[in-house]
Amino acid sequence: MKITKIKADKNSIIIYADCDGKATVRESSPAVQGGMTYSFSGYEFKDGQAVLPRFSGEHDALYSRFTVYLGTERVEGQRYVSEISPDCAENDSPYPAHKYIKAINASPGMQKKMFNVEQGRPDVSLPGLMTLIPDDDTLEFEREGKKYYFRGAPVRQLDEYMKAYGHSTFILLNSSKGFGNRGEMALLDMCLHPKYDEENPNALISAFNMRSEDGVAIYAAFVEFLVSRYTRSDGKYGRAAGAIIGNEIDQQGIWGNAGDMTCAEYISEYSAAMRLAWQIGRKYCSHFRVYISLTNNWSIATPGSPLRFYTAKECIEQLAKQTAEQGDFDWHVAYHPYPENLFWPDFWHDRAAFFSVNTPHISFRNMEVLEAFLSQKRFLYNGEPRRIVFSEQGFNSMNGPLERHSELDGEAGVVLAYMKARNMKTVDMFTHHSSVDNPGEFGLNLGLIRHNGEPKPDYYAFMAMDTEKESEYVAKARARIGEDLFDYLLHPEITDVPKDENDSLTNSILTNTN
């Protein structure tokens, strides 16, 4: 006997198995280390199915882990709901069809004045938004019979941001250092990962705490508040299309710290956070997407401990392996294809960005490798490829005598990179990071606008794309990069995507639709 699928509809959880007969089903919390048991009951599988009630009072079994026993043996196979009937969601509209892939993370005022793009990408931090100390300006939110509180001022700021864009994709963060955190220790003790190396000044963000019941509950309330508010059919507070879980988790020692773990161990907890966000998202919105966040370090890791720094390639492979075993869901990929050296914007000169699935880096130069890699049958979801958002990338402009030279490289670079991303068949978003230079960003000037408010050359190039001015900037970019090199990089060939006799992948699978 093997569990082949677990599905949820409006009132039931249906467990599918490859045989019939009496069995015992244990329903427990999704907390990764054990988790409390909600129920332990006998069920009969008929025609390969056992039907369980979805709701028990305020409790929703949609998020539970299911373990099935036949006699004295535990049955192998899937353990989580991996299919949710679309009619469960109030908002059953398809994923938004954006006219352009162009996106920015800019304030509402700057978006209206200088960008006017369709897609936004706000950073939202749990400790910056939530509180355990209600006051006259907190918003109360109830989940599974418990009350949670959200700070009024940052929620209103997020409302304003969300309404400035057609749709936005959140980056969900868990930071005790900045991002609006007020140092509320009772909250941090719940939401920060138990192994977060808080004393390490380089550990800027914690992983979400999926180990304790309190940690799972506060994270779930955080996600459900956002999803319920920003996927409403009427768009009252703005519209969210999905959520990126954490930031650059292949560098978890910095951006999603959970202490020392192997990549497999880390992904087992990270995938639990992804899955829970997906389940919550699909409860409210049938097109809601979740993404893994990765750097440009593809098959080499950032120097440091191998228990804190992984390769992006290994993270994807572990995520695919583990979710396939426990119940696959349609996770997607948020990638940051910066130049291999973030200080030098001329990515066409990158030396470790090859047109191979084993390339050390995936930068703007070879960003098509990611799509080719994900086109393998082992990564498809229901026969369809995972979608890609390029959620953070940009072009540094230097200070000093090379300032003008680097800005012109950035101008050419944004044209070629945008055209390459637009040519790809599974890309839904190209987010320039950031709108304005940030003086605290590790010595980098990655904005389209200088500190003093003056637009850089790449601002005008970015804004020209998909307009009647595009051809003018394409001509300038080809002249700066070199026409032959520009044209070659615009349509490179990746020849070493692994195939086997069962892989009948054709270009018809890769369609330029979302």
Image (cartoon, rainbow, N blue to C red):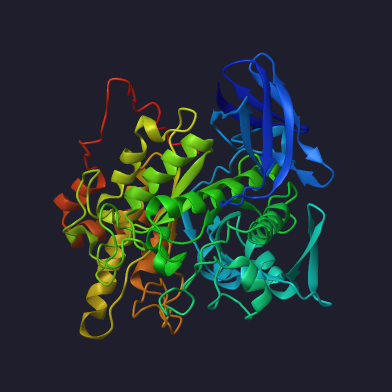
Front in this rendered view, residue 301 or 15: 15
Q: Is residue 98 left or right of residue 202?
A: right
Where the N terminus falls, by quadrant? top right
| Residue 479 seen in the figure | no
Q: Image quadrant of residue 441? A: bottom left
Report x, y in % for residue 225. 71, 58
* As drawn, 284 above or below 218: above
x, y percentage for residue 85? 67, 31
Q: Does residue 94 appear in the picture of this structure?
A: yes
Name the residue located 29 percent from the left edge and 64 percent from the top edge: 302
Q: Position of residue 381 (x, y in %)?
A: 47, 33
The x and y percentages for residue 65 are 63, 41
Residue occupying the point 38% across, 50% down: 315
Q: Is residue 358 left or right of residue 375?
A: left
Q: Residue at x 60, y 49 (%)?
A: 34
The answer to whether 244 is drawn above or below residue 23 in the figure is below
What is the residue that sits farthest to the front in this orientation? Answer: 72
Left or right: residue 320 compared with residue 396: right
- The quadrant in which residue 415 appears is bottom left
How many dots with numbers? 0
Q: Is residue 332 above or below residue 398?
A: above
**Quick one: 429 or 5, which is closer to the camera?**
5
Tell me: residue 414, above or below residue 444. Answer: above
Which residue corresponds to the image point at 40% horizontal and 61% vertical from the top-left?
462
Is residue 216 toward the left or the right of residue 507 in the image? right
